[in-house]
Image (cartoon, rainbow, N blue to C red):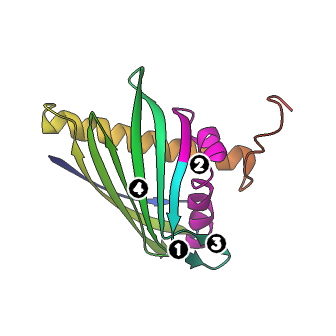
Amino acid sequence: MASLRMEGTVPLGLADLWRLLSLHMDEDTIRAIHPWMLSGSVLRDEGRASYRDVVLPSRHVVDRVIRVAGRRVRDTWTYTIEPPTSFTYEIRSPEGLVSTRNTYRQEGFGTRVLTEARLEFGRVPGFIQRRIGSRLLDRADTEDLAYLRQFGFRTVDATRPKGT
């Protein structure tokens, strides 16, 4: 198992960061944010967690089909949500396991994010797992901010035809 640690500041206050994280609980919106997530269905939501005007389940479990390296992979995502300090998720699939814990701290006009991840992709060497994990996490951050620039904090209306 390989481990990865990343730290940086996102240009969002803590309240706005949690608004962004809440968008990830809606399967239509998460596919709009991250196009490599092809489909998903919520298996269960448990408990309740809140921060300011954001209310989330404290545990959220989703089956998803994602596209990684040109392949479709079916996996199960389990989120543990503890606002305002942490957002943890575990991704289990036949190809391996990714366990990621993000912790947050308001810092000026942004939020300091510390990401600690454990990666296990079968027989892939640890240094390659860390490189892949780092690229995927950077890509997800870039997609999050691009979505906000384009749509703000709106959720996607799945009933609207594309292009309208």
In the rendered structure, find residue 54 and report the number of the disc placed on it.
3
Start and end of the magenta stretch?
14-41
Q: Earlier in the sequence, mark 2 or mark 1?
A: 1
The residue lying toward the viewer, choosing from 19 and 96, is 96
Classify residue 75 as left or right of residue 119.
right
Camera-near label (2 vs 3) is 3
| Number of numbered labels in the structure image | 4
Q: Quadrant of the C terminus?
A: top right
Taking the image as drawn, is residue 12 in sight?
no
Q: Earlier in the sequence, mark 1 or mark 4?
A: 4
Residue at image position (63%, 52%) is 26
Element class at badge 2: helix
For label 4, the residue is 78
Which amino acid lies under the numbered mark 1 shown in the image of this protein? Gly
- Does the segment drawn in magenta span residue 55? no
- Disc 2 or disc 1, which is closer to the eye? 2
Residue 140 sits above or below residue 44 on the image:
above
